């Protein structure tokens, strides 16, 4: 189902606005999807979360520390079609 993310920006504590190539867009609460441990621990800091970027080669969001997220999981969350989501750690 892979749809590429084409826009991403931090919108609040643990929150990202995402837009996918097919127009699906909205806000994601990472607190519901991510255990803020390991590579994800720095993302608890709003300044670090705001460093989010779109990696056009893999079509997902990433951060300078190497953290990234599966775009299929993010798409399913926005589209209201859960994939049996579990917290990522």
Image (tube, rainbow, N blue to C red):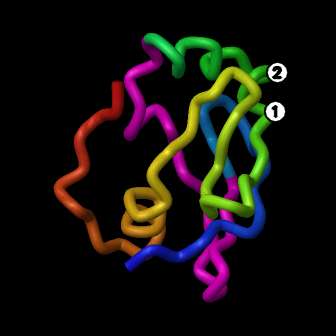
Q: Residues within 10 Å of mark 1 (few under 14, many from 20)?
A: some
Q: Residues within 10 Å of mark 2 (few under 14, many from 20)?
A: few
- Res 10 quadrant in image: top right
**In which quadrant is the C terminus drawn?**
top left
Q: Which residues are magenta?
A: 17-37
Q: Which residue is mark 2?
A: 47
Q: Position of residue 26 (x, y in %)?
A: 62, 66
Q: Nearer the viewer, residue 55 or 11?
A: 55
Residue 61 marker: none
**In which quadrant is the N terminus drawn?**
bottom left
Residue at far bottom of view: 22
Q: Position of residue 4 (x, y in %)?
A: 60, 71
Q: Residue at x 75, y 40 (%)?
A: 52
Per the image, is 35 magenta?
yes
Q: Which residue is mark 1?
A: 51
Q: Pointer 2 and pointer 1: residues touching (CB < 8 Å)?
A: yes
Secondary structure of the residue carrying tag 2 is helix
Q: Residue at x 41, y 31 (%)?
A: 34
Vertical position of residue 86 compared to residue 41: above or below: below
Vertical position of residue 46 compared to residue 83: above or below: above
- Res 22 quadrant in image: bottom right
Q: Position of residue 8 (x, y in %)?
A: 75, 55
Q: Would residue 18 appear left or right of 1 to someone viewing this image?
A: right
In this rendering, the count of numbered labels is 2
Q: Nearer the viewer, mark 2 or mark 1?
A: 1
Per the image, is 71 magenta?
no
Vertical position of residue 32 compared to residue 20: above or below: above
Secondary structure of the residue carrying tag 1 is loop
Q: Nearer the viewer, residue 1 or 57?
A: 57
């Amino acid at each position: 189902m892979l749809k590429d993310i084409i826009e991403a920006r931090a919108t609040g504590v643990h929150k990202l606005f995402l837009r996918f190539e097919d127009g699906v867009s909205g806000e994601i609460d990472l607190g519901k999807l991510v255990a803020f441990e390991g590579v994800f621990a720095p993302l608890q800091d709003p300044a670090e979360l705001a460093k989010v970027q779109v990696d056009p080669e893999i079509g997902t969001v990433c951060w300078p520390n190497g953290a990234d997220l599966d775009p299929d999981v993010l798409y399913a969350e926005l589209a209201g079609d859960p994939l049996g989501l579990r917290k990522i750690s």
